Amino acid sequence: MKLNYFKFGTTALLWLFGTTLVSAQQLTDQTDIALNDLSAFKDPGKTWSTAEKVIANPKSDNELKATKGTGILVNISTNKIKGSDLFTNTLHGNMILELDYLMAKGSNSGIYLQGNYEFQLTDSWGVLNPFSSDNGGIYERWDDAKPEGQKGFGGYAPRQNASKAPGLWQHLKIAFQAPQFDADGNKVSNARIISAELNGVLIHDNVELFGSTRGAADKEKALGPLRLQGDHGSVAFKNIKISKLPADQLNGGKRGGGGADPIYIDAQANTMIRSFVDFAPRKRAVHAISVGSPQKVHYSYDLDNGLLLQGWHGEFIDATPMWDGRGNGTSNARGVITSFTKTLVPAVAQLSDPQANWPSDTTGTGFRTKGYVMDSEDRPQFKYNIYNAQVTDAINVLDNGKGLSRSITIDKAVPNLYVLLANASAIEEIAKGLYLLDGQSFYLELNETSGKPIIRDIDGRKELIILLGNKLNYSISF
């Protein structure tokens, strides 16, 4: 089976279907929706405001904390003060919509294209098999005349759950084709989601919308406002950009052929694959292993440095680059990737003092990889020698399937031996032992028995380090 993925274009040609459609294209030709205030929206309710920063508590339902300012659109809707939907002043027809959004824990929202077709936003973190009501789904249609249990119909689930944890920014990109009407107002062509990508993963491809979804604001039409749902929970948006849909992408665009059939590896049980791993731009680990789980939480590990490279939710591995033809040795994650490092450096190092530079390689440490052993559940525990001691590094999926736990132990104490927990653009402690990292990309939480880590400023970036002692436990959620 050949799978051909839609590529978003950056330039647009005007598609001339008539005056109505031309107007729709003109109205969507804007670079972004300014969020200096709420003037871009019609009669905003009191729960909507702008903010400079928004943080969610990942352990408390429907809790957002906003810092006064601009650049972020935030809706704080509670049981006491229920929010309302927000409509743009301008209308749109065909368009490419791109934005970032952030969900509170347990919250529910949505984006209604033209006010009528809901693209579901909700906290679906950890859901294994998503439905149309989950994050990234195209919500169902509704008919009160149908029997109970059949009133809702026609929704589209995302291809896989590409959601991140509440409180982390998520990126959405939708190519939308508006319905078309003749001169008498009769619909002659249904609306379509040409393509939708959530956090870089294709979750919808050329989906026809046969009618408005439940909760539509009006009857179907050629032009309509962008509508943000605000009455079901707290949510934030930023970087909202609307641009023209290229003419050659209408009705699904050009469906290219040729090329190799993809070679996919699923992880229906704990599964491992050795390959090169490109973990950051122009950065490749050549002695890496990727470990998959049936909970659909996976990671890649660098055997040369004892370094956790990346983790992801969703499907496991695309081995096409490695096994098609002669191959190039690499494999690619098929889900939503969270990078934990930008450089290949040792995971542990002996420092002369807490502010000493982290070494760039293992020279002089006596590092030697000892491979791995399998535990009782067929999960690898990595082992290596360093500073005349042996380290055991066990990385497992959290019991709730929402991230990874890591346990690093050493068989004898080494003075001033530190673990590099994170190298990130930003590191912030938002609760005791709970850190938000890298522009709200992932969380790191230390076990209560761990010592106090150190946040260091290194060449414009942040490092989070901690003394190892004999054992260290922490978790990563993403």
Image (spheres, helix red, strand yellow):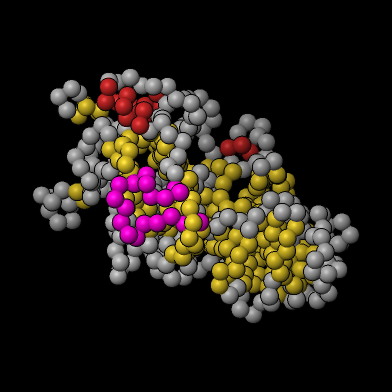
Give the residues drawn in magenta, as a range.
35-52
Q: Position of residue 258 (x, y in %)?
A: 51, 24
Q: Nearer the viewer, residue 53 or 136?
A: 53
Residue 190 visible in this rendered orientation of the protein: no
Q: Residue at x 56, y 69 (%)?
A: 430
Picture quadrant where residue 77 is located: bottom left
Q: Residue at x 82, y 54 (%)?
A: 361
Q: Residue at x 49, y 62 (%)?
A: 67
Residue 463 versus residue 113 in the image, above or below: below
Count of number-bearing discs: 0
Q: Position of residue 31 (x, y in %)?
A: 46, 36
Q: Nearer the viewer, residue 54 or 4?
A: 54
The answer to whether residue 263 is magenta is no
Is 111 displayed left or right of 272 in the figure?
A: left
The answer to whether residue 37 is magenta is yes
Is 9 displayed left or right of 389 in the figure?
A: left
Residue 283 versus residue 473 in the image, above or below: above
Residue 169 visible in this rendered orientation of the protein: yes
- Magenta-colored segment: predominant secondary structure: loop
Q: Position of residue 252 (x, y in %)?
A: 38, 29
In this view, the residue farthest toward the bottom is 449
